[in-house]
Image (cartoon, rainbow, N blue to C red):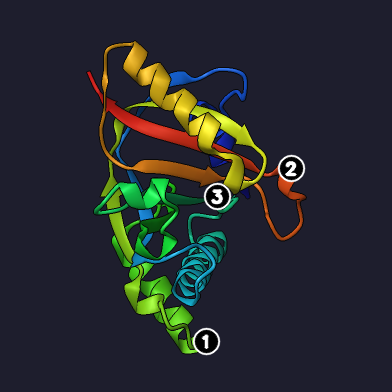
Amino acid sequence: MAKIDVKKQLKHLYQPSKKQVVSVEVPPMHYLMVVGKGEPGSPQYAEAIEALYSAAYTIKFMIKKGVTDVDYGVLPLEGLWWAEDMDDFINDNKHNWQWTMMIMQPDWVDKALVEAAISQVKLKKDLAAIELVRFASFSEGSCAQILHVGPFSEEGPTVAKVHGFIESAGFTLSGKHHEIYLSDIRRAAPDNWKTVIRQPYKI
């Protein structure tokens, strides 16, 4: 059985340095996605995460047991964050935050497989958000990113560093604030949480 480490293959996207901001070109990739609104940790947010992981792991095991005979690690959870009024971020009005939580899918995952996996999940579990899971392509293009180590509440200076890198190069911020959660926050201490901070920009 072939074992593939997708995250290692995409090391430049999923394992950036924590020492300096770098530019990357992010190609179009396919994701499982759930769109929602409200603060992290809310019931709606928790339901979205549960549905995404249930679908992602079902897809993984369907592939592992199928004709492709491939084993791979499920990719980390990612989040796009924004607000209609960006002051809601500055003022920490989390109830107005909007998000798309997502898990990237390898090239060998297609729409038919995702639909079959979601049907399996529905048969086995009663998940409130499983109907919200969609499979779609997402493209960011030119981005700046860095690794943040520490609690989410201390991301501010890291985000500012990314924005400063973009602005000092004469570019313009575009798209949505993007985070990739590399740590299992249920097990790791907050001081050791690793999060990729990514921001698209226009040249």
Residue 85, horizontal then vertical, whole percent: 26, 51
Residue placed most toward the observer, 36 or 76: 36
| Residue under numbered circle 1 | 124
SS for callout 1: helix
Upstream in sequence: badge 3 or badge 1: 3
CA–CA distance between discs 2 and 1? 36 Å
Residue 47, horizontal then vertical, whole percent: 48, 75
Residue 91, horizontal then vertical, whole percent: 41, 50
- Circle 3 or circle 1, nearest the eye: 3
Instruction: Please name the amino acid that badge 3 sits on.
Output: Pro
Q: Against 20, is 152 above or below?
A: below
Tell me: 171 left or right of 47. left
CA–CA distance between discs 3 and 2? 19 Å
Residue placed most toward the observer, 18 or 125: 18
Which of the 4 image quadrants contains residue 201?
top left
Question: Crowding at label 3, few (<14), some or many (≥20) Cα neighbours within 10 Å?
Answer: some
Query: Can residue 103 be seen in the rendering of this structure?
Result: yes
CB-based contact (under 8 Å), mark 3 and mark 1: no
Tell me: 168 left or right of 5. left
- Circle 2 or circle 1, nearest the eye: 2
